[in-house]
Image (spheres, rainbow, N blue to C red):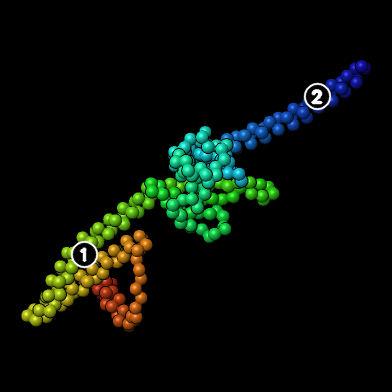
Amino acid sequence: LPIIWMWVNLAAFLISAIVVFGGGFKLANTSLIEKATANRLESIIANLADGVVVYDNNFKIIIFNNAAEEIFDIKKEEVVGANFGPERAGDHKYRLLTQVMFPSLAPAVSRLSEAGIYPKVIDISFPENDLRVSTDKLVNEHNQVVGFIKLVQDRTREVQLLRSKTEFITIAAHQLRTPLTAVNWIFEGFSTNKELLPEDKELANNGLAATRKLLKIVNDLLDVSKIEEGKFGYSFEQTDLIKFMTDVLTNAQAIAKEYGIKLYL
């Protein structure tokens, strides 16, 4: 070729090469960013404190993170890619996982969210585990449901601590009530003693009122324990509202006097 055409072709070749290389570099860079983002997301899911179980519409498990392995005592290699149906509940090894995926098979379920509303939040109680499970839908760009994700929180230790607290309150209240009842009888005996001086009788009446108030607090603590256990029954009755308010103000008079406040009804 004439020298001029050689330079033209060379320039065209260089321009084409730059365009192709630039496009390829941009594509590779985009692919690298997407891969890095996917790896980071996978790392976050793998190291979440709550169990993560993701499955498609055919109940084939796609994601099973480290926390889920600990909660269900199953390795991800055993379940990822496998389909789980209700029949798996017959296998002791997979029973817990199957009951979480199909809560109707669980022994005790308490719903914390409205029916038909996602995410669905439920508490599932087992003889050895207490789990809180949140279920949400996975949708594609056409808003079609392609699967579900479950976040599983192991509340076993939390529930045990709550039970221990309730037991402690119950035992402490019972042990307080016995000596307080004895003290109440003593003050009641003093308050009815006609030989006491007026100032001593006033002290006895104040002690009796304070003891009765303490006994009421102890009984309230026992009622709280019953409420938490779901064993408390309410008893409704007619009440003299004026007397009730008078008692409230009488109990508050001591601290009101300390701050120089007068209370009126």
Left or right: 1, with 29 as reference point: right
Residue occupying image coordinates x 78% and y 25%: 17
Left or right: 96, with 33 as reference point: left
Between discs 2 and 1, the one toward the N terminus:
2
Residue extending furthest toward the left: 195
Which residue position is annotated with label 2?
14
Residue 53 x/y as whole percent: 53, 43
Residue extending furthest toward the right: 2
Residue 18 x/y as whole percent: 77, 27
Residue 161 x/y as whole percent: 34, 51
As drawn, the label of residue 177 is 1
Residue occupying image coordinates x 18% and y 64%: 178
SS of the residue under disc 2: helix
Residue occupying image coordinates x 77% and y 28%: 20
Residue 213 x/y as whole percent: 24, 71
Q: Amino acid at mark 1?
A: Arg
* Image-quadrant location for residue 219: bottom left
Q: On the rendered image, what quadrant is the C terminus found in?
A: bottom left
Left or right: 33, with 195 as reference point: right
- Categorize mark 1 by other alpha carbons within 10 Å: few (<14), some (14-19), many (20+): some
SS of the residue under disc 1: helix
Q: Amino acid at mark 2?
A: Leu
**CA–CA distance between discs 2 and 1?**
96 Å
